[in-house]
Image: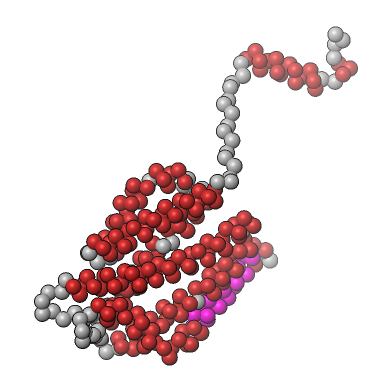
Amino acid sequence: MNPSGDSFISHLIEMRDRLLRAVLGIVILFICLFPWAQDLYALLAKPMLASLPKGGQMIATEVTTPFFVPMKVTLMTAFLLALPWVFYQAWAFVAPGLYQHEKKLGVPLVVASVLLFLLGMAFAYFLVFPVVFGFVVGVAPEGVAVMTDIGKYLDFVMTLFMAFGLTFEVPVAVVLLVKMGMVSVAKLREIRPYVIVGAFVIGAIFTPPDIISQFMLAIPLWVLYELGIVVAALITRGRPAAEPEADYVPMSETDMDAELDRISSATEPAETRKPD
């Protein structure tokens, strides 16, 4: 039998088991949340409904949309609630192959990743959505009733959730890049102007065309980038600097001959040496 082949098969089996456990956790939460599917969608739609004029409402343009959209929201909620369990299964799979110092760094990074992603979604829901939907309703032409399709609304808010959730992951990405030696803290500070420009470009792509919502994505991205630099600098502060290599000075012919004579005389048997 091939030991390496058996080891590979055992790793595949363990990965399958971990994936099944993660999916099972999401499914169990989904079943538990299913009775409140309509309430969860109402909570998600609240910022839009609050921005609509009095008597305004949302619509469904497809036959199955009123059923499937709340189910999607419930599934998304179940996934978010199961994130600690999902990350635990991933950690349990990779942890045996990590060094001790990698394990010490991995746990805080995983916890920080989950918290920052949820914080980004909360930032979008409580601060960005009211501004965005207020702008959209406010610029509607006279006589136009704003009635958003619930399926299109879900797609839109999911895009913003992902954009702000990933934006809040910037400190984790910066720390990982520094710890892996792919970039230095000094280099991160050097490219700061390009990052600021990139933040506003990303804000223009993923948010509606109003200036306020663009700034609400770009400014946190910039601030979180600076936070990542600070954390990375604190982590690497105690790391000893690499010693500079000594300059190589080539040996002259005379010195080389003298060194060879010294080595040969040192290794010559005592009885063959000439008396001084």
Looking at the picture, does residue 175 appear above or below residue 30? Answer: above
Query: Please, which residue is most extreme toward the bottom here?
Result: 35
- The residue under the point 22% across, 70% down is 135
As for residue 22 lying within the magenta part, the answer is yes
Viewport quadrant of the C terminus: top right
- The residue under the point 85% across, 14% down is 273
Q: Name the colour scheme.
A: secondary structure
| Residue range of the region highlighted in magenta in the rendering | 7-27
Q: Nearer the viewer, residue 42 or 105?
A: 42
Looking at the picture, does residue 196 appear above or below residue 156? Answer: above
SS majority, magenta: helix
Viewport quadrant of the N terminus: bottom right
- The residue under the point 70% across, 15% down is 258
- The residue under the point 57% across, 33% down is 244
Q: Is residue 59 left or right of residue 230?
A: left
Looking at the picture, does residue 178 appear above or below residue 30? Answer: above
Residue 228 picture location, percent across and down: 45, 54
